[in-house]
Image (cartoon, rainbow, N blue to C red):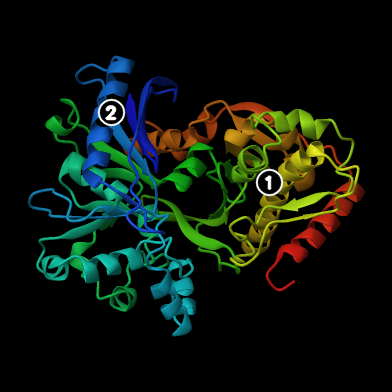
């Protein structure tokens, strides 16, 4: 049996899987978010560990795991969030700065104005944005008294959440390549911390950063007191979106997944050569197994499920998100109504922070069904835009899109997504794909499974086949692109 730890932004979920990748037991608890100033988001790293420790015990108990029955642990985590701690005492030296935190936006603008974005793009595949970890570490070095000297002399270390949990479980200061690739400090081609970027972002001492290991393999051995009496290897680690890609069985180039949440993350397996990231997309490490590093193209879409929430909470035209399915289906066409949900700007592949939400095509006959349908269509169009940009960048056509997240419950949306993409949209049998990906990586790491086994053990629950003609698809996309142009900041 394998314990998968899925430490997310709002809580920790643990699931125990057996050797057939079937879930046997699980548990979940929320964690607290702190907002000390506008735009700042923090977590208490102690609470993250305490909740994770407790939930792991509950999941093991729920599965009835006895002594000697657990083979390995896999970890997946909220990415880019940064912790600092004393490696001697194991105590945090500041609250964790969360990926959502925007306090370093000014520093990113300074670096961009100074012409450093091409360097960052070339080495890391990322863009200059406070989303990533590097400027958060620089902020800690400059604002926590004595931290720079402590880091220089080995009395303070930094890490993303996987690294923090690994330290608490095993005493090792390590991370995996997928999480390292989200820091803006890691050269994804050379596979090492980049000295020039370390210096650029405040002189981060390399000794204060974790060793970067493979995503599948032995990253450390749990101390029995840290894991309810179990001394087993932590054998799989990946950031949440990369873990979801692996959990969806997208182990071959050209395979992709979309996770529909408040926003959406689309990842495409780009194979073993890092693709040149086009504007608006990220290149990232998908996972490293043995000496082979797989890469992915990634798109972040800011508003998908949040647009449905806006219909409910902002406009009050629905009471439940599920109502949108019947409303959309009640219309034969969209009647020319389009909604560009740029409520917080546009994400990938447009990256236009100044775009604004726009509704076009309204007539006296338009009603709430039109707005509901336009909102669902917009989710699909935004995903289509990301996928098309990825296909151009990778040279790999998408054969099918594997999907997970809350919006997959909306059958109308899933069918429309397949129609506009022109490829099947496929739902997995096990919906907790991030936890499953961590378990798969751990199983590969201890030799329980091979990558081929992961491909074979992924199971399909439902498939939506495209049924829309080319002419209709082309006509819809003309309307969408027109609406998109009106929403852009330069319009």
Left or right for 449, reference 249: left
What's the mark number on residue 114?
none
Answer whether residue 181 is visible to the viewer in this image: yes
Residue nearest the viewer, comparing 330 with 210: 330
Residue at image location 27% in from the left, 75% down from the top:
202
Against 55, is 213 above or below? below
Left or right for 66, reference 334: left
User: Looking at the picture, how far across and down is residue 407, in whole percent?
Assistant: 62, 35
Discs 2/1, front: 1
Answer whether residue 291 is visible to the viewer in this image: no
What's the mark number on residue 379?
1
What's the mark number on residue 56?
2
Contact flag, marks 2 and 1 (Cβ < 8 Å): no
Crowd class of label 1 (few under 14; some 14 to 19; many from 20; radius 10 Å): many
Residue nearest the viewer, comparing 296 with 357: 357
- Image quarter of the N terminus: top left
Tell which residue pokes out farthest to the bottom in this image.
Answer: 114
User: Looking at the picture, how far across and down is residue 246, in whole percent?
Assistant: 48, 41
Against 143, is 64 above or below? above
Quadrant in the rendering for residue 350: bottom right
First in residue order: circle 2 vs circle 1: 2
Report helix, strand or loop for mark 2.
helix
Residue at image location 27% in from the left, 34% down from the top:
51
């Amino acid at each position: 049996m394998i314990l998968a730890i899925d430490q997310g932004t709002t809580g920790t979920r643990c699931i125990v899987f057996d050797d057939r990748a079937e879930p046997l037991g699980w548990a979940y608890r929320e964690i607290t978010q702190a907002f000390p100033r506008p735009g700042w988001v923090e977590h208490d790293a102690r609470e993250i560990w305490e909740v994770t420790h407790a939930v792991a015990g509950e999941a093991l108990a729920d599965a009835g795991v006895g002594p000697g029955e657990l083979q390995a642990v896999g970890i997946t985590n909220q990415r880019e969030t940064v912790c600092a701690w004393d490696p001697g005492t194991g105590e945090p030296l500041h609250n964790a700065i969360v990926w959502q935190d925007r306090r370093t936006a000014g520093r990113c603008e300074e670096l961009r104005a100074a012409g450093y974005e091409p360097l960052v793009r070339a080495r890391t595949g990322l863009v200059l944005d406070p989303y990533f970890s590097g400027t958060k570490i620089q902020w800690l070095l400059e604002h926590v008294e004595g931290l720079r000297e402590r880091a220089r002399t080995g009395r303070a270390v930094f890490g993303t959440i996987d690294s923090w949990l690994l330290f608490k479980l095993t005493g090792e200061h390590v991370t995996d390549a997928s999480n390292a690739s989200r820091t803006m400090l890691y050269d994804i081609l050379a596979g090492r911390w980049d000295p020039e970027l370390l210096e650029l972002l405040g002189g981060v001492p390399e000794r204060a950063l974790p060793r970067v290991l493979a995503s599948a393999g032995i990253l450390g051995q749990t101390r029995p007191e840290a894991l309810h009496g179990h001394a087993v290897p932590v054998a799989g680690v990946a950031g949440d979106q990369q873990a979801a890609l692996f959990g969806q069985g997208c182990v071959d180039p050209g395979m992709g997944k979309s996770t529909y949440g408040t926003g959406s993350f689309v990842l495409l397996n780009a194979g073993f050569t890092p693709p040149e990231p086009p504007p608006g997309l990220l290149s990232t490490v998908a996972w490293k197994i043995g000496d082979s590093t797989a890469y992915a193209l990634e798109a972040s879409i800011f508003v998908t499920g949040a647009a449905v929430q806006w219909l409910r909470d902002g406009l009050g035209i629905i009471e439940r998100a599920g109502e949108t399915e019947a409303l959309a289906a009640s219309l034969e066409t969209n009647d020319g109504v389009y909604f560009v949900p740029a409520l917080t700007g546009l994400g990938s592949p447009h990256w236009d922070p100044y775009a604004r939400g726009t509704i076009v095509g309204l007539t006296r006959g338009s009603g709430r069904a039109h707005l509901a349908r336009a909102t669902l269509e917009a989710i699909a169009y935004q995903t289509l835009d990301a996928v098309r940009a990825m296909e151009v960048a990778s040279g790999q056509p998408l054969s099918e899109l594997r999907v997970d997240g809350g919006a997959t419950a909306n059958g109308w949306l899933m069918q429309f997504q397949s129609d506009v993409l022109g490829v099947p949209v496929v739902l997995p049998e096990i919906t907790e794909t991030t936890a499953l990906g961590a378990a798969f990586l751990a199983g590969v790491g201890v030799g329980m499974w091979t990558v081929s086994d992961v491909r074979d053990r992924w199971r399909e629950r439902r498939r939506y086949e495209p049924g829309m003609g080319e002419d209709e698809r082309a006509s819809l996309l003309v309307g969408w692109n027109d609406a998109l142009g009106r929403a852009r900041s330069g319009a």
